[in-house]
Structure formats: structure tokens, C-alpha cells
Image: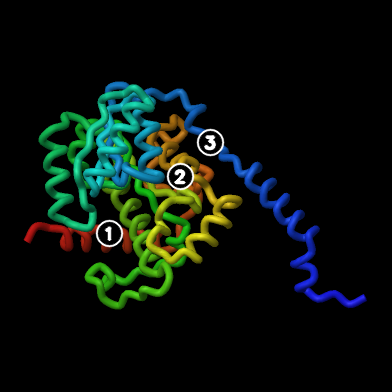
């Protein structure tokens, strides 16, 4: 009896067994570290979380609020930021949640945001994905900086022309990969410069996460992404675990200049991120690029 591959794929038993396997895979997708099992309190602490109105950022802010921190939501959209603020206040009972507008694509907006934080806050203990107020962090030590990168940084390339928008390849996620590599390189050099200050800086991969990042793609791509993601990708809440681990866990205390994977384990980043000379060059280049004219 001759079988074709199409016969196998269309057989009901194949479909049933595939579904069962996917369900088992989803059930077994458990994190090695869960923030709900971490007893650390953040009463009297101040945290800034960028992109906190949705996805991973909102769950990070929600966790900090549950721990009693004053949480500043740095968001581009006032409407979405206000909605997140109200949700977090109602969910946690913590009224010490505040919204500050920030458009990270605008250096002018970043400078204004940082200036306002410096003016309004006496201390800053946790900074997630924003390095605009490091002087205040030093005064508040011990403090932690957490930059969310991605395992895609392994596919990134270092080309300083990219910072000026030159020689960019916009095919698929190439630009994203380059950006995430620069995240890790810059964070490691920042950590070196912060040695002895009591401020740590680490980067991480949150996992492949189901967020609204695909909202601008066509229906077919979104459908396939969501179908596969339901079984194999992390939820936004699960994606917040490794950033929260770096920001609050006792295990991560004192660790700096390192890269964590989505299971909250220390792993080596891509080779360019381990090159100290490249880190110095990148940091100084970014300083010149972002300096006021």
C-alpha cells in the first residue's frame, strides 16, 4: 500500500496527535522563577518603567505596584497610559502610580522626561529600559537598570552607520536584530562605568512573547503568529518574569554587566557584546550622537 505525505498530514489521527502534543507543550511551559513566589517588597522605592501601558511593560509595572513601589509609567500615548494607570491602581490598591509621557523616538522628549524625573523625584531605585536619569540612580543606590533585549541580538551586526539611518536592511527583522545587539553592548559598557556606584545594569531576553507587536501586519500573518504562539510562545505576563527577576530578586543582587535568558539564567551574549573595546567605542559614539547641539 502506497502512502503519500499528504495522506498522512490529512489523516485525523495526525491532527489529533499534533493537537495533543501542542497542548502538552503548552502545559509544560513553566518558568523556573515566578515573581509571585518572590517575597521582596518595594515599599519606599521608586521605579520607572517605559512602555508600561501594554504587554510586558504593563505586567512589570503591575508587579512593582503589588510590591508597594511608587511606579512611574513612561508612555507615549496619554490615553493608553491613563487606562493602564487606572487598571494598575484598581488591581493592586496602590494609588502611588503616576503617568509621565515619553516618546523614546524623540531625543527632545527623552531629555524633557529625564529632566522632569530629576526635578520631581528625590530617589530612583529601578529603571526598566530607560537610561535617562542615571545620576539620580547613583544617589539612590543600591539601584538597578534593566534593559530588555532579545536573543535575536545574535543575528545583529555592528555598523555605526545604522545610527544615522544609513545602510539599513529593512528585510524582516534585520533592523530589530541590530538594535537588540546594541542594547546588550551598551548595557555592558554602562555596567562597567557604574562599577563602585551601587548601581547595576543588565540586559535580558524575555522570551518569544505574545504581544500586540504584530498588530500592523496583515491578517494572515497575525493569524499564523497567534495560532503558533498560543501553544509555544509566552504570554506578556510570562515575558515579564525575567525583567522582574533582574529588577527585584535577591538572586540578582549585585550582578552587573550580564545577560539573562528567558529562564532567568545567566548566559553568554553574542561575541560583539563581549568585546570591551567595542563597548567603549559604542558608548562614546552614543554620547556624541545624543549630545545637545
* The quarter of the displayed image where residue 13 is located: bottom right
- Give the spatial CA distance, label 3 vs label 2: 15 Å
Asked if one can make out residue 141 in the rendered structure from this viewpoint, the answer is: no
Disc marking residue 33: 3
**Residue with the mark numbered 2:** 236
Callout 2: helix, strand or loop?
helix
289 on left or right of 270: left
Residue sitting nearer the eye, 244 or 60: 60
Could you tell me residue 11's position as x and y percent?
A: 79, 64
**Residue with the mark numbered 1:** 280
Could you tell me residue 240's position as x and y percent?
A: 44, 41
Disc marking residue 156: none
Q: Residues within 10 Å of mark 2 (few under 14, many from 20)?
A: many
- Give the spatial CA distance, label 2 vs label 1: 33 Å
16 on left or right of 177: right
Residue depicted at 57% across the width and 56% down the height: 227
Q: Is residue 136 above or below residue 188?
A: above
Amino acid at each position: 500500500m502506497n502512502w503519500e505525505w499528504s495522506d498522512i498530514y490529512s489523516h485525523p489521527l495526525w491532527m489529533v496527535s499534533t493537537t495533543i502534543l501542542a497542548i502538552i507543550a503548552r502545559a509544560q511551559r513553566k518558568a523556573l522563577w515566578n515573581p509571585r513566589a518572590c517575597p521582596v517588597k518595594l515599599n519606599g522605592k521608586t521605579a520607572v518603567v517605559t512602555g508600561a501601558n501594554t504587554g510586558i511593560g504593563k505586567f512589570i509595572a503591575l508587579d512593582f505596584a503589588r510590591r508597594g513601589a511608587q511606579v512611574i509609567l513612561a508612555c507615549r500615548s496619554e490615553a493608553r497610559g491613563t487606562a493602564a494607570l487606572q487598571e494598575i491602581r484598581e488591581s493592586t490598591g496602590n494609588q502611588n502610580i503616576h503617568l509621565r509621557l515619553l516618546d523614546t523616538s524623540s531625543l527632545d522628549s527623552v531629555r524633557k522626561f529625564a529632566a522632569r524625573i530629576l526635578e520631581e523625584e528625590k530617589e530612583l531605585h529601578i529603571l526598566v529600559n530607560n537610561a535617562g536619569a542615571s545620576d539620580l540612580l547613583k544617589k539612590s543606590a543600591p539601584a538597578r537598570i534593566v534593559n530588555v533585549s532579545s536573543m535575536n541580538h545574535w543575528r545583529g551586526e555592528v555598523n555605526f552607520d545604522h545610527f544615522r539611518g544609513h545602510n539599513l536592511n529593512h528585510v524582516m527583522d534585520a533592523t530589530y536584530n541590530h538594535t537588540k545587539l546594541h542594547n546588550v553592548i551598551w548595557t555592558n559598557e554602562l555596567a562597567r562605568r557604574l562599577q563602585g556606584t551601587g548601581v547595576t545594569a543588565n540586559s535580558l531576553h524575555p522570551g518569544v512573547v505574545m504581544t500586540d507587536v504584530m498588530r500592523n501586519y496583515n491578517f494572515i500573518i497575525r493569524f499564523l503568529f497567534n495560532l503558533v504562539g498560543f501553544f509555544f510562545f509566552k504570554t506578556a505576563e510570562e515575558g515579564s518574569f525575567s525583567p522582574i527577576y533582574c529588577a527585584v530578586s535577591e538572586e540578582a543582587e549585585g550582578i552587573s554587566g550580564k545577560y539573562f535568558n528567558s529562564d532567568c539564567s545567566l548566559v553568554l551574549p553574542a561575541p560583539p557584546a563581549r568585546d570591551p573595546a567595542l563597548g567603549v567605542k559604542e558608548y562614546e559614539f552614543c554620547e556624541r550622537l545624543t549630545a545637545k547641539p
